[in-house]
Image (cartoon, grey):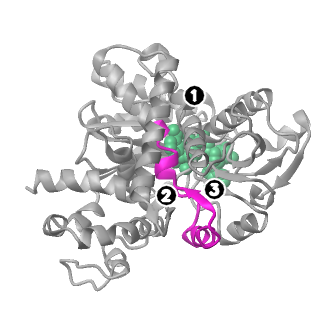
């Protein structure tokens, strides 16, 4: 792909290799988005004049810091903490914190870049950011998690604030970690303010924030199927992951009449031909909350088959919902899904489908919903939590759930409006263009310093 760059680089790849070397996940995310928005930039004098392209792929700020903390044995361990404040054109930065050994600048830049467009799609005024640490919480005690969170906030507090940057959770950062992080901020700053979302409802958290991403995925799927004269009711669904997004997506899918036949974690996947029930999902949540617990124990509790070290994409189903992590569904998986007659792939995780796999799905005309649209429900309710904190009010679960459904429907409509291609809807293109326009227009309007 050639770009009219102000630099000497002859194409996007050369530009990225030079400006962001050794960052494969970030390159993957940029290349995917740019394929869709390049024609829009090329046709717009204001976008070209403001050099929107180069400014969009350069984070406004990358903060990296030391996190030194004491483990239960009294030894001091050192991790690296980050906050990538990618683009603040449409609002204060917003995006999750991830604690996982795979966290590095490439992964966080890809996530923060994607978050910028996702947040724009929600229609709420939030800029894009992401952060976290290479800390691995597997097998750590509750006291160690608390000390790590406290040490992490010891530095992060300088860079966040209600009008600056409001982080949330992501992989391995759930209600418990948000509680410890919030407590640390409050003690350091001596202020109770809305600097994190996903807080407990007892301390200014929003109803439905925990459920929002997974429920939103299924609301988006409902709209997508409805616009193709179909519905979730009666569908068989494969879900990967066994965390926040996966379990709440499963819960809503079951409530809407689907049969969910799998969940997975980093040790393998479980196949339950009878389908998950609310009881089984509740058990998974309680079980996975224990330090280092593997999903393998599911079959002892409920039967089914355990496939150690494998992903669930070989199962036969109508819908696949990857809800674990990036690049978990590859080209061969997509071919297997297509061979088995899959009708749609909906991304609950961020960028779980590789570029090769997306090409296979698109060649076979399989419906594809990108994460930046389908999983935007979490950040949307985070946006509502910010508003509730500002007004010192709290909304009830029904009110928030209705707002979430409306936002997901609006995102679906934006994808349809911008994603028309050969008489069909290319949802990835629609999401990229709709998110881009809002951010780019704000950048142009604000000029440069
Ligand atoms: P959780 O930590 O709650 O769950 C993550 C799940 O994915 C776990 O089952 C975990 O297995 C599995 N997993 C994590 N890393 C890997 C890996 N490298 N290989 C295989 N399995 C892995 O995270 P969430 O559910 O919050 O997040 C899941 C995805 O959804 C991420 O891509 C996240 O960015 C995205 N997302 C989350 C949002 C939210 O509101 N939470 C909002 C929007 C997107 P194990 O337990 O064995 O580690």
Classify residue 437 by image quadrant: bottom left
- Distance Cα–Cα, label 3 vs label 1: 39 Å
Kindly identify the residue that appears in the image at 29 percent across and 17 percent down: 391
In what quadrant of the picture does the N terminus appear? bottom left
For label 1, the residue is 143
Q: In front: mark 1 or mark 2?
A: 2
Q: Is residue 135 magenta?
A: no
Residue 172 visible in this rendered orientation of the protein: no
Vertical position of residue 253 compared to residue 419: above or below: above
Location of residue 23 with respect to 387 vertically, above or below: below
Q: Earlier in the sequence, mark 3 or mark 1?
A: 1
Q: Circle 3 sits on which residue? A: 345
Q: Position of residue 356 (x, y in %)?
A: 58, 73
Residue at (48, 13) in percent of width and height: 202
Q: Residue at x 39, y 57 (%)?
A: 418
Q: Which residue is label 2 attached to? A: 427
Residue interval drawn in magenta: 351-378
Question: Is 90 left, or right, of 249 in this rendering?
Answer: left
On whether residue 366 falls in the magenta region, the answer is yes
Mark 3 Cβ inside 8 Å of ligand 1? no
Q: Where residue 223 sits: x, y (%)?
A: 55, 43
**Residue in front for this viewpoint, 73 or 442:** 442
How far is disc 2 from disc 3 in space, using C-alphas? 11 Å
Q: Residues within 10 Å of mark 2 (few under 14, many from 20)?
A: many
Residue at 54% over, 29% down: 210
């Amino acid at each position: 792909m050639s770009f009219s760059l102000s630099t000497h680089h002859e194409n996007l790849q050369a530009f990225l290799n030079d400006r962001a070397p050794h960052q494969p996940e970030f390159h993957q995310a940029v290349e995917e988005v740019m394929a869709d928005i390049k024609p829009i930039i090329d046709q717009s004098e204001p976008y070209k004049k403001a050099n929107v392209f180069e400014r969009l792929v350069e984070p406004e700020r990358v903060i990296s810091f030391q996190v030194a903390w004491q483990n239960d044995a009294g030894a001091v361990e050192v991790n690296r903490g980050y906050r990538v404040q990618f683009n603040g054109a449409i609002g204060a930065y917003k995006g999750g914190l991830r604690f996982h050994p795979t966290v590095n600048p490439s992964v966080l830049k890809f996530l923060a870049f994607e978050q910028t467009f996702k947040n724009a799609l929600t229609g709420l005024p939030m800029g894009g950011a992401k952060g976290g640490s290479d800390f691995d919480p597997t097998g750590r005690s509750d006291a160690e998690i608390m000390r790590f969170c406290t040490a992490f906030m010891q530095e992060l507090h300088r860079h966040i604030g209600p009008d600056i940057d409001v982080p949330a959770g992501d992989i391995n950062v759930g209600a418990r970690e948000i509680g410890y992080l919030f407590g640390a901020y409050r003690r350091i700053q001596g202020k109770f303010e809305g600097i994190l979302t996903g807080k407990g409802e007892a301390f200014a958290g929003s109803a439905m924030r925990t459920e929002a991403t997974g429920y939103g995925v299924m609301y988006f799927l409902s709209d997508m199927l409805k616009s193709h004269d179909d519905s979730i009711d009666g569908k068989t669904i494969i879900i990967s992951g066994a965390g926040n997004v996966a379990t709440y997506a499963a819960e809503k899918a079951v409530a809407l009449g689907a049969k969910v036949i799998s969940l997975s974690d980093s040790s393998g996947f479980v196949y339950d031909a009878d389908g998950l029930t609310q009881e089984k999902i509740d058990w998974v949540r309680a079980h996975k909350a224990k330090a280092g617990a593997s999903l393998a124990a599911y079959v002892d509790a409920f039967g089914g088959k355990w496939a150690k070290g494998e992903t669930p994409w070989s199962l036969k189903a109508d819908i696949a919902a990857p809800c674990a992590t990036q690049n978990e569904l590859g080209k061969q998986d997509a071919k297997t899904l297509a061979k088995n007659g899959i009708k749609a792939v909906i991304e609950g995780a961020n960028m779980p489908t590789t570029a090769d796999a997306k090409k296979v799905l698109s060649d076979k005309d399989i419906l594809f919903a990108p994460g930046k649209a389908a999983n935007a429900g979490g950040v949307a309710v985070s946006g509502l939590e910010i508003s509730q904190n500002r007004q010192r009010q709290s909304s009830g679960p029904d009110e928030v759930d209705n707002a979430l459904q409306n936002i997901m429907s609006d995102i679906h409509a934006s994808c349809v409006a911008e994603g028309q291609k050969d008489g069909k809807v290319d949802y990835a293109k629609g999401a990229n263009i709709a998110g881009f326009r809002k951010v780019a227009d704000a950048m142009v309007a604000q000029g440069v310093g």
